[in-house]
Image (spheres, grey):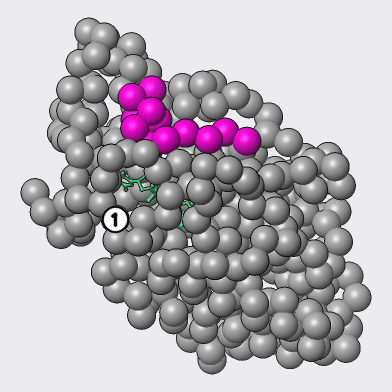
Amino acid sequence: MKKILITGGAGFIGSHVLRLFVNKYPYVEIVNLDKLTYAGNLENLTDIEDKENYSFVKGDIVDEEFVNDLFSKNKFDGVIHLAAESHVDRSIANPTEFIKTNIIGTINLLNAARASWGDNMEDKIFYHISTDEVYGSLGKEGFFVEETPYDPRSPYSSSKASSDHLVRAYFHTYGMPVKISNCSNNYGANQFPEKLLPLMINNITQNKPLPVYGEGLNIRDWLWVEDHARAIDVIFHNGVLGETYNIGGNNEWTNIDLVKLLCATMDKKLNRTEGESEKLITYVTDRAGHDMRYAIDATKIKRKLGWEPSITFEKGLELTVEWYLTNSDWLNNITSGDYQNYYKQQYKN
Ligand code: NAD
Ligand code: DAU
């Protein structure tokens, strides 16, 4: 591959994927296409922005003319598509934006890639990054496997499910060389503090209430973002066309236990007395339609591609907390301005 387009590279996961690819493949040109929404931040990429094989294009995947123009000016051999509206709570407040970016944006990219590749699809790859939320909500037992029927329940997961279906339809109908992966909850550096862990880290640091939805008993399967980036690399290069791979951490936590572990970790880092941060926990109104449990069976990617998580959750959480404490400027910059309005609206305080 000579030239790869990565969409959403200024976001949380995209920035880790870009860093891995730009450093690991110095002879491949990597183009980062990002609209720089509230979630996109070029500060996430300062360590690679001057690399010769990296370039940035600001643009909106919903803008069909712009996307077509980008593909006619560049001969991309591969696309790794991460750009999306990604926060469930925002999708509940404003679903339409999710339909535009996650569905229309994806079909614009599929159409532009198809037009650009024509009959020469050999050696090309369109890799769509998706989520475990498309499978719906689990009870106490069971795991999501690649064959689990789709049952999305939020506007966010419905829009991601729709885009997954379109990507598969382009494989079956037009022979597009596609791959899809569905990953569980990521955590790590550079995550926007609307998501559980960075929001709680920010609030603990500032001694603000820690808003736990409902009874805090919902379960998520947490994976270190750098391990997700490694999985994306492995699937992009070695995954089979037309196939789906589930990616997960085999690491289930109820939200309340996770927040308590985070409080204990931060008490140590901030030299607080044991149990001090936990006192900030506040139970708030539950998320509408809150999915109870997500849990990934990642056997396929382990068996077929040899990928598995590289670090323990305790280690990953410690590295994550250290990163946010060391990079307080990064956090302060994005929690000023619009973030305050979002927070007031979402948490009504
Ligand atoms: P994010 O919200 O941090 O980043 C999204 C990026 O996409 C931002 O840089 C934003 O500017 C860009 N973007 C948004 N709309 C755009 C548009 N119309 N045109 C161009 N760029 C646009 O998201 P994330 O958490 O890094 O997630 C990345 C992808 O991975 C998403 O597709 C998401 O569904 C998927 N995913 C996320 C998780 C997770 O735990 N965060 C887990 C599984 C899958
Ligand atoms: O499972 C993969 C998905 O994980 C991704 O597709 C999404 O893009 C990503 O945002 C994430 O979705 P969740 O809704 O699981 O993540 P979030 O961090 O928003 O919430 C995690 C859990 O914590 C969820 O059960 C809701 C709860 N929560 C969240 C927030 C922000 C709280 O209790 N309080 C909060 O303030």
Residue 6 picture location, percent across and down: 62, 63
Q: Is residue 341 left or right of residue 118?
A: left
Q: Is residue 2 left or right of residue 89?
A: right
Q: Which amino acid is tagged 1?
A: Arg
Above or below: residue 150 compared with residue 259 = below
The residue at 58%/75% (across/down) is 163
Question: Residue extending furthest left?
Answer: 349
> Is ligand 2 within 8 Å of the beta carbon of the residue shown at mark 1?
yes
The residue at 18%/28% (across/down) is 280
Residue range of the region highlighted in magenta in the rendering = 250-261
Quadrant (top left, top right, bottom left, bottom right) of the N terminus? bottom right
Q: Quadrant of residue 291?
A: bottom left
Residue 90 picture location, percent across and down: 31, 64
Residue 33 picture location, percent across and down: 55, 68
**Residue bearing the label numbered 1:** 287
Between 63 and 136, the residue placed more toward the observer is 136
Above or below: residue 158 compared with residue 69 = above
Between 140 and 108, the residue placed more toward the observer is 140
The residue at 81%/74% (across/down) is 177
Between 49 and 209, the residue placed more toward the observer is 209
The residue at 81%/70% (across/down) is 242
Residue 53 picture location, percent across and down: 69, 56
On the question of residue 206 being in view, the answer is: no
Q: Is residue 202 left or right of residue 232?
A: left
Between 48 and 311, the residue placed more toward the observer is 311
Queried whether the magenta region covers residue 255, the answer comes back as yes
On the question of residue 317 being in view, the answer is: yes
Q: Residues within 10 Å of mark 1 (few under 14, many from 20)?
A: few
Q: Is residue 56 left or right of residue 5?
A: left
Queried whether the magenta region covers residue 247, the answer comes back as no
